[in-house]
Amino acid sequence: MLGLMQDWPLLVTRILDHAAQWHGDREIVSRSVEGPIHRTTYAELDRRARSIASAAGRELNIKRGDVIATMAWNGWRHLEVWYGLMGIGAVVHTLNPRLFADQLDYIVNHAGDQWIFTDLTFVPIFEKLQDRLAAVKGFVVMTDRAHMPAETKLRNPICYEDLIASGDTGFAWPQLDENEACGMCYTSGTTGNPKGVVYSHRSNVLHAMMAVAPDALALSSRDTVMPVVPMFHANSWSLAFSAPMVGAKLVMPGPKLDGQSLYELIDAEQVTMSAAVPTIWLMLLHHLEQNPHLKLPHLERVAIGGSACPEALMRAFVERYDTEVLHAWGMTESSPLGTFGARKGTLKHLAHEEWWRIKVKQGRPPFGVEMKITDDEGRALPHDGKAFGRLKIRGPAIAKSYFKDDGASSFDAEGWFDTGDVSTLDEHGYMAITDRSKDVIKSGGEWISSIELENAAIGCPGVAEAAAIGIAHPKWSERPLLVVVKKANAEVSREDVLAHLTGKVAKWWLPDDVVFVDEIPHTAAGKISKLTLRQMFKDFVFEAN
Ligand code: AMP
């Protein structure tokens, strides 16, 4: 017997319908690429998304199923393009401006992008690259007539505000199937070529519903949400969907992501919740430390993830600024939210420091994410907080394959996706990332977590950033080398760092050496590039060898 409930396809435009109808006057505040702060509302976003949808169909011949790229900061026009194009069944492919030209060229051609919507900032990138993007019909520059570059070499440049002015604000969305694709994002590709993840309307709506829950990002209409996590990488952690879903005010930081600019927006717009990677929060903290009179009276909580959040960073927010920190883990393939570090009811009784030992972990899965750890043969490992193995996940907002079937070996016959992360799971269900499987340091048949070494080193006074890699060793196969960037004007020695680590990690985990560099290389997604670092130190030999 079938249920007798209504068929109501989970389409992302329904989120905007809801926001426009029930929270129509709620503001969206953006720092524009052109400079000034821009203000609009959900009602206006809805009208302009419909305009761009109708104009894209009529003027650019964009059709259901076409893949259309955006390269843009978080801002109101980017939201209009997302909702407008997804609403007509096009697939919005977000491009990360921090990718190298060769990677961009590869993914635009691999995805089959037909048009590129670009912020003014990125026009020079495409002027250089466009000859390698033969299938791209033209470029929509997301600005008004007054700011259109007077002379651009771009092929077929179109002014966004002219295009939208020709559209119809009352355009009716077509009926789509909830399983149709609406978004695409490529993995950062630290090994081999980047791989395409294709989101559906259904997966994005379900993912946003997971994200708003109290033990997840806990969003409500009373919140003012500032997504620092970019729309161009992993769906801005759902915030472009989940904030409108609950009618939260949105504050979009545009191109300025330095500590001072973010502080100004947090303060002026009274932001209550924000989400970003650790590097961003370190910059904000630095700004606060430089200006001790500044406080964060409105900022109730921040979500930190994307790479491991050092305990010192979490404590700084909680203990100095009374801002709660939620550690989260996820990846492009999981839309991206996979775990959240919210406290369980059964752990309420824990003493303060006991809870902190769990709070620093990456968290536990919400409804909609199945999770297990296995050994290399696929045998499930115990949830004892000690055994570490391959982290595998399954669920309705997790990829079942990559675009064009690349990387098929990451998916097994039972639908589990091998994340490439190595982790533990404890008896309460909290997961802790130990490493990327290719980054763990294999010493004498045992594994050393590079992430734990890095987190411990970050707490050492004078250390700005640290990265641990395995260096070939004749006896142990690999031993850890710690690469450190000092804070400006700080005096810190190899011995200081080793003394700081002693007692914080197992003795046999202590790095065999510590070297100081001016800069640690990062990937386009802002993570430490272990691949580049291993290249840099490929001839390194420990002195005692
Ligand atoms: P991406 O798909 O580029 O977002 O990268 C996903 C990867 O980032 C994951 O597989 C992890 O290796 C890493 N990652 C994300 N969040 C965390 C976190 N909270 N702690 C440690 N690593 C993380």
Image (cartoon, helix red, strand yellow):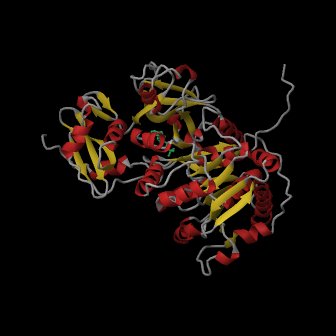
In the displayed orientation, state which residue is furthest to the bottom. Answer: 150
- Say whether residue 524 is left or right of residue 445: right
* Image quarter of the C terminus: top left
Residue sitting at the far left: 544
Q: Residue at x 45, y 27 (%)?
A: 352
Residue 28, position as x, y percentages in the image = 69, 56
Residue 263 position, x and y percent, is: 53, 56
In the rendered view, does 117 fall on the left or right side of 530?
right
* Residue 296, position as x, y percentages in the image: 53, 49
Image quadrant in which you'd find residue 3: top right
Is residue 508 placed above or below 67 in the rendered structure?
Answer: above
Name the residue located 72 percent from the left edge and 42 percent from the top edge.
Answer: 246
Residue 105 visible within the image: no
141, above or below 149, in the image: above
In the foreground, 124 or 517: 517
Say how many tags the image has. 0
**Is residue 120 in view from this perspective?**
yes
Q: Locate the N terminus and report the quarter of the image it occupies.
A: top right
Q: Position of residue 322 (x, y in %)?
A: 51, 41
Taking the view exactly as shown, the residue that stands out farthest to the front is 293
Q: Is residue 528 left or right of residue 131?
A: left
